[in-house]
């Protein structure tokens, strides 16, 4: 009898919520980071961060004994706080940089040492198989970033090894994910000095190139650059084959339709990551703040609709009250 009074999901929801909370607790334990938990924090400070971890550092002449302060070049500065909260927080600096960097001033040849790539550590390792680094690398090598620069554009141009954090898993909302992803693109495409490191091509302004959109600002705030500028991938969650500008999406129907490409890019990624991290209930039902395609709200229509509903309720209420008042009078005359 009790099942007839209460639907089955009333009993299932508490169980799912318990399992969901347990998953969240496990993820929280995995995410413990910080200098205080690093085995190499002291060595990193002594060897590297005492200079590269400060915007102002001291330099001394061992012959004359004179010393003075210098400003650290922006591209040589590494924020200790950001580093110890990145995915590589537990590493020693010298795990990736050669022993030649122990000596100061650094020998000129250290600046020409070959940097590690993602596959050097993460490739062909069952531990990281679920991230499909090999397929990502194959896509990247077909991208315009790689082919147009003859390999000068590397993973690190987008994913700084000192600061990298998985955006979708470690940002507060879908909009934060979009903002940080686009910020990554604009770091180069909005700065001619940085672009000059990999190409002699003149930088074109981003917004004017997107004026064909009905509302460029709203689109750029609601969609990642890579959703229009990469080739869709069925197997990799975040596509890495960046296409040339003339191959990018330039049709409204590609997004604003039942078979929207965003269902296979932006929403596919965010839904899976949210579900894996927060569980089905929290991640899919309660925390779903996805941008709904073709359903942008118009303030005028929203206010008009609310006013109509309010007037209907007022009329219905007044009609009810009027009927209640006149009923005794009507009975009296009858």
Image (cartoon, rainbow, N blue to C red):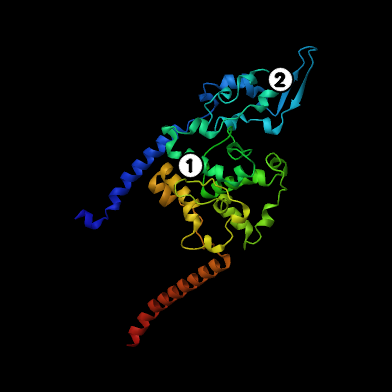
- Which residue occupies the extreme left position in the image? 1
Residue 79 visible? The answer is yes
What residue sits right under mark 2 in the picture? 105
Residue 255 shows in this picture = no
Q: Quadrant of the C terminus?
A: bottom left
Tell me which corner region of the image, top left, top right, bottom left or bottom right, holds residue 152: top right
Question: Which quadrant holds the N terminus?
Answer: bottom left
Note whether 55 is above or below 194 in the view shown.
above
Which mark sits nearer the N-terminus, 1 or 2? Answer: 2
Q: Quadrant of residue 129?
A: top left
Residue 214, percent from left and from top: 62, 63
Q: Give above or below for 29 relative to 257.
A: above
Q: Residue furthest bottom?
A: 334
Disc assigned to residue 275 = none
Indicate the secondary structure of the residue bearing disc 1.
helix
Residue 110: give x, y in percent of width and height. Answer: 66, 24
x then y, percent, for residue 323: 39, 78
Left or right: 127 in relation to 209: left
Mark 1 packing: few (<14 Cα in 10 Å), some, or many (20+)? Answer: some
Residue at image coords 43%, 73%? 317
Residue for point 64% across, 45% down: 148
- Which mark's residue is nearer the viewer, 1 or 2? 1
Q: Circle 2: is it few (<14), some (14-19), or many (20+) Cα within 10 Å?
A: few
Image quadrant in which you'd find residue 192 = top right
Residue under circle 1?
Answer: 135
Q: Is residue 168 above or below residue 61?
A: below
Up-down relation of residue 114 to residue 246 (above or below): above
């Amino acid at each position: 009898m009790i099942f007839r009074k209460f639907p089955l999901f009333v009993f299932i929801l508490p169980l799912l919520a318990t399992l969901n909370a347990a998953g969240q607790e496990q993820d929280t334990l995995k995410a413990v980071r910080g200098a205080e938990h690093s085995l190499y924090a002291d060595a990193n400070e002594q060897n590297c961060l005492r200079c590269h971890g400060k915007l102002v550092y001291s330099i001394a002449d061992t012959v004359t004994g004179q010393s003075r302060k210098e400003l650290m070049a922006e591209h040589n500065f590494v924020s200790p706080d950001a580093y110890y909260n990145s995915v590589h927080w537990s590493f020693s600096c010298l795990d990736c940089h050669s022993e030649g960097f122990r000596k100061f001033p650094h020998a000129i040849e250290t600046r020409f040492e070959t940097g590690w790539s993602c596959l050097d550590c993460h490739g062909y390792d069952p531990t990281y198989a679920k991230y499909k680094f090999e397929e990502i690398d194959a896509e990247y090598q077909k991208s315009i970033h790689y082919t147009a620069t003859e390999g000068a554009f590397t993973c690190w141009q987008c994913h700084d090894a000192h600061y990298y954090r998985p955006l979708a898993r470690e940002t507060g909302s879908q909009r934060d994910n979009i903002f940080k992803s686009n910020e990554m693109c604009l770091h180069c495409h909005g700065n001619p000095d940085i672009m000059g490191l990999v190409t002699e091509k003149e930088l074109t302004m981003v917004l004017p190139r997107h004026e064909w959109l009905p509302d460029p600002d709203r689109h750029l705030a609601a969609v990642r650059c890579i959703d229009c500028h990469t080739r869709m991938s069925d197997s990799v969650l975040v596509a890495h084959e960046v296409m040339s500008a003339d191959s990018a999406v330039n049709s409204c129907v590609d997004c604003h339709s039942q078979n929207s490409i965003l269902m296979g890019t932006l929403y596919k990624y965010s839904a899976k990551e949210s579900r894996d991290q927060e569980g089905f209930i929290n991640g899919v039902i309660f925390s779903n703040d996805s941008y709904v395609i073709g359903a942008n709200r118009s303030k005028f229509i929203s206010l008009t609709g609310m006013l109509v509903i309010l007037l209907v309720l007022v009329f219905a209420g007044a009609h009810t009250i009027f009927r209640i008042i006149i009923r005794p009078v009507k009975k009296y005359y009858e």
